Image (cartoon, rainbow, N blue to C red):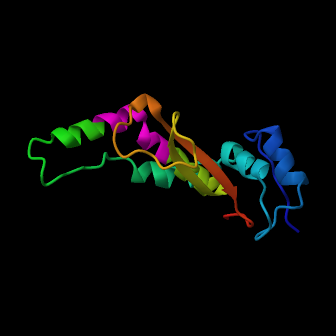
Amino acid sequence: MAEIVISNGMTSQLTELLTNNESIEPGSVAGYELCKILWEQHPLGGKLVEKPITMALFKPRENNLEDDPDRRIVKAFEGVWLRLGVTEKIRNLHFITRCYGAAAIGVGTTSTKAAEVLPSFGLSESDILLTYSIHLMRQAPW
């Protein structure tokens, strides 16, 4: 018969979850709280969720336009990208997706209703919103 050995490195919340919770089975439904506890407190949780995405986003992306030999448009785009923190928002979106199952990112403005189409021109940086939506999977991702 197998024994469960608990080291002192685990938090009480994780210890209780792993020893007293019989609902953790392969293929079972994993709720938000279970996923959150495993991601934040399990020794491998953060590594499994965050490491592949951190590695993929390690190097900055190269942006090129054939019609922009002086790179003015590319430099302006990259400046706005950095000021809005889009790389970090994409990283967080993928963290949420790997942990909880599925997520989406929405782009909007403070002056336009969600049902309306965003204007193609004339958006200011202070007007742009990026928001997340979490969709829990029916089965645990592990």
Queried whether the magenta region covers residue 38, the answer comes back as no
| Number of marks in picture | 0
Furthest residue to the front? 116
Q: Is residue 86 above or below residue 127?
A: below
Which sits in the foreground, 42 or 106? 106
Q: Can you give x and y, in whole percent of width and height, for residue 21 in the image?
A: 88, 55
Report the front residue among 12 and 29. 29
> Extreme bottom residue here?
27
Q: Residue at x 51, y 34 (%)?
A: 111
Left or right: 66 in relation to 50? left
Q: What main secondary structure does the magenta stretch of the protein show? A: helix
Q: Is residue 89 magenta?
A: yes
Q: Residue at x 77, y 51 (%)?
A: 34
From the viewer's side, name the closer residue of 70 and 31.
Answer: 70
User: What segment is highlighted magenta in the picture?
Assistant: 79-90
Residue 97 appears in which quarter of the rendering?
Answer: bottom right
- Which quadrant: the N terminus? bottom right
Q: Give the residue furthest to the left.
A: 69
Vertically, is 88 above or below 50?
above
Residue 101: give x, y in percent of width and height: 65, 60
Q: Can you say which quadrant of the picture contains the C terminus?
A: bottom right
| Left or right of 75 in this view: 133 | right
* Residue drawn at 19 percent across, 51 percent down: 64
Question: Residue 3's x, y, as percent?
Answer: 85, 60
Outermost residue toward the top? Answer: 126
The percent position of residue 54, horizontal first and vertical second, equals 45, 48
Q: Residue at x 74, y 67 (%)?
A: 139
Could you say which is closer to the camera, residue 132 or residue 52?
A: 132
